[in-house]
Image: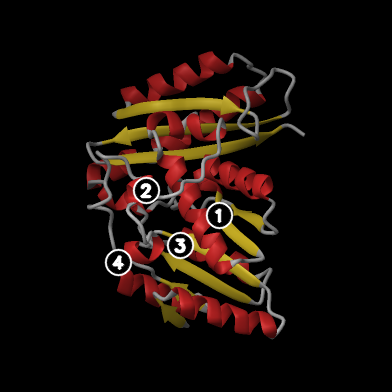
Amino acid sequence: MILTDSIDTLRTTIARWRAEGARIGFAPTMGNLHAGHLRLVEVAHEHVDRVVASIFVNPLQFGPNEDFTAYPRTLLEDLEALKSAHTDLTFTPSVETMYPRPLADLTRVTVPGLGKQLEGAHRPGHFDGVTTVVARLFNLVQPDLAVFGEKDYQQLCIIRRMVADLGWPIRIQSVPTVREPDGLAMSSRNGYLTAEERRHAPALARTLQEVAGHLRAGERDFAGLSLAAMQILNEDGFRTDYVSIRRPDLSPPSPDDREWIILAAAWLGPRTRLIDNLSISLV
């Protein structure tokens, strides 16, 4: 595995691979990797000849009271994991490499509408930070395919919209959420949970399953189902930001729909904010 923090080395290596006829896949990460991240690399290998991963904790997507400083950084372990997953190149840029001018003066990429609801409403500016860093990484790597996990479903929708709107010839491949045996969606922030909080955490996924059961049984009071799910979570020790039933494109649902996605975000304890989602199809 090639390891570099240099844009020149990244571009030179990718240019050589392209001259050899290779197709390039890309898996952007913020590190502190788990099995879900490694699954991204595995899926990319199924479609392309060479896979590039990046590890970069992006300051633009953290709010002023969020965990940028505390976000776990485990570079040595991450590199070993990526090597074991047969990653061809890992790009580990510094903040100065990614953003050579002051952040306040930086050009931003914004996806309106999609970026202001749900997560965007609770984390103002978050998705502008995501789309800006992903746009820069796409310009540096110029992949044929990029892989993103479905756990961050709204992010996935936003990146697809950005790629379509900007006309980039990049295929966005989604990868199903990887879960712990008890159903908890894998996340780098799960490490913040205390032992007691970790025992409670799978209730988030179970609650989504309960909402799905009501939808499959024919209930269509979307607002009522969402409010009931939030009450269940709050009574179980969560502080719920939202539970929302949407169409797969995140537009408001209709009783005549045959497909929905249930999205949720909730705090468990003082430090850990969990997000999850569940797709429903009656087709």
Q: Secondary structure at mark 2?
A: helix
Nearest to viewer (mark 1 / mark 2): 2
Quadrant housing residue 170? bottom right
Could you tell me how far apart the alpha carbons at marks 3 and 4 are, in whole angstroms? 14 Å
Q: Which mark is drawn over residue 105?
A: 2
Q: Secondary structure at mark 3?
A: helix
Residue 7 in the image: x percent, y percent?
Answer: 46, 73
Nearest to viewer (mark 3 / mark 4): 4
Q: Which mark is drawn over residue 35?
A: 3
Q: N-terminal of the two: label 4 or label 2?
A: 4
The correct choice, above or below, for 179 with respect to 13 in the image is above
25 sits to left or right of 207: right
- Foreground of the two, 257 or 194: 257
Q: N-terminal of the two: label 1 or label 3?
A: 3
Query: Are dots 1 and 2 in contact, CB under 8 Å?
Result: no
Query: Are dots 1 and 3 in contact, CB under 8 Å?
Result: no
Q: At label 1, which amino acid type do we have?
A: Phe
Nearest to viewer (mark 4 / mark 2): 2
| Quarter of the figure with the C terminus | top right
